[in-house]
Image (cartoon, rainbow, N blue to C red):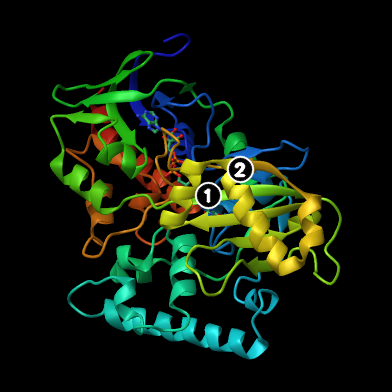
Amino acid sequence: MTGLSSEVDVAVIGAGAAGIGAARRLREAGMVSVVVLEARHRVGGRVHTIAPKGFPLDRGAEWLHSADRNPLSSIARSLGFSIHRRPPEWTTRLRRSGETIEAEAEWIALREAQSRARRQAAAEPADRSLASLLSPGGRWNPLLDATSTWGNGAELDRVSVKDNVRYEDSGTNWRLGEGYGRLIETLAEGLPMSREAPVSRVDHRGRQIRLETARGTVSAARAIVTVPTSIIAQEVMRFDPALPDKLAAAAGLPLGVDDKLFISLKGPIPGLEDGSYLVGSTTSRETMSYQVRPLDRPAVYCFCGGRFAAALEREGEGAMFDFAAGELTRLLGSDVRKRMAPLASTAWLQDPWARGSYSYALPGHADDRAVLAAPVDDRLFFAGEACSPNFFSTAHGAWLSGIAAAEAALASLRPAAADR
Ligand SMILES: Cc1cc2nc3c(=O)[nH]c(=O)nc-3n(C[C@H](O)[C@H](O)[C@H](O)COP(=O)(O)OP(=O)(O)OC[C@H]3O[C@@H](n4cnc5c(N)ncnc54)[C@H](O)[C@@H]3O)c2cc1C
């Protein structure tokens, strides 16, 4: 492994937000040798900024969710990143989507009632799905389902109530002018890293852990696993001896599907404030959420999730664009069609090193996050968004889980270090 030691104190598997957070914490502590093993040619994982037309586009994480409690907010500020604090008007997008103000108020009240019902249901002994709280035939059920696919990556019938209410949302959401991916890239600078080194086997039979990668074998006293649950559940990376509890927990926490389409848009939309949000349809679960000219950029950001997004991914960018252009034309008038062209799109389910977007818990599997996060023999540690008890599915949840795993690994090494 050119330029890298093949024997280290701690190997971190995966250079996403969790892996970078872990590696930085280990480096800060000093005294331990570290290597980050990353499957891709780039760092960041599900946080990735591109700039095909000169302005940044976040293919994955974009929002500093719970920004007032998110440690990456102050880190970004200290590194000179520009922070946009304009709140996203997610709750008021119906009035621009063909609904009256009264209907929008009914929708907002229903969302609040659903939120109360979820908290009540979560206090019951048995877990159940979010869909079990719907009124049969309810007028807003399709939109509630679509909203679940945007938030959870999955329809309401797939999502655990108990897990869903554990997510902590402060309600403050900010964005970085330069892109979230650029922040994670900046934080990765200078870390000992081996790219294009997918780990296929974690052999923890002997005193040293042996990590088989496409670029050779690394021997480590400790390993921090930060790969997505899909990679564990589908056994793209295997443990030897097998870890059935981890396999089951990863399967209980599948990655949902969320995808983005970026459309270039010439000129403003008369009567529509820049940065406005729209919903393609308030009566179909197969619809997209749109932001028109976000951050004054000549673009529309389109977002879709769940089974609908999985199907669009398979059809490709052309199908995604046709769908979005159809919905936008219906809402904004036919003139807008000639001013739009596809700019970029994502296919996170087909991405071999993600295989999905972010984790949700299946009904009955809320406690799988703690099972997944638990260390094995105080030598194998686990991090990543799915391990976060309260900020799962986010980049800052991943980051914090990485720091926690690094601290646990350091604590486990201290007695050994004292013996030297
Ligand atoms: C469309 C979309 C929108 C999102 N929006 C937001 C948002 O606005 N705000 C927010 O906070 N979060 C958002 N998220 C979620 C956020 O991106 C993730 O929760 C977070 O980035 C996960 O970080 P992680 O380190 O746990 O995993 P990852 O980022 O997946 O990192 C794991 C790393 O492991 C690597 N890897 C995989 N297999 C192997 C292997 N066998 N060997 C070595 N390396 C391997 C991967 O390449 C990857 O780099 C979004 C995600 C998507 C897809």
Identify the image quadrant of the C terminus. top left
Q: Which mark is residue 70?
A: none
Give the camera-side residue of 245 and 207. 245
Residue at the extreme bottom:
102
Q: Residue at x 65, y 58 (%)?
A: 326
For the question of whether residue 395 can be seen, the reply is no
Q: Residue at x 14, y 41 (%)?
A: 244
Q: Secondary structure at mark 1?
A: strand
From the viewer's perspective, is 394 left or right of 134? right
From the viewer's perspective, is 327 left or right of 340? left
Give the camera-side residue of 112 and 303. 303
Distance (Cα) linking label 2 and label 1: 14 Å
Q: What amino acid type is highlighted by mark number 1?
A: Asp
Q: What amino acid type is highlighted by mark number 2?
A: Gly
Q: Residue at x 30, y 42 (%)?
A: 382
Q: Please state which of the two labelled residues, at mark 2 or mark 1, is closer to the viewer.
A: 2
**Relative height, residue 377 to residue 262 (above, below):** above
Q: Earlier in the sequence, mark 2 or mark 1?
A: 1
Q: Residue at x 40, y 23 (%)?
A: 33
From the viewer's perspective, is 138 left or right of 58? left
Q: Position of residue 302 (x, y in %)?
A: 62, 55
Tell me if the residue at label 1 has its CB under 8 Å from ligand 1.
yes
Q: Position of residue 386 (x, y in %)?
A: 35, 51
**Relative height, residue 316 to residue 109 (above, below):** above
Crowding at dot 2, Cα within 10 Å, few <14 / some 14-19 / many 20+, comes out as few
Q: Which mark is residue 259?
A: 1
Q: Which mark is residue 318?
A: 2
For the question of whether residue 103 can be seen, the reply is yes
Choose top left, top right, bottom left or bottom right for residue 115: bottom left
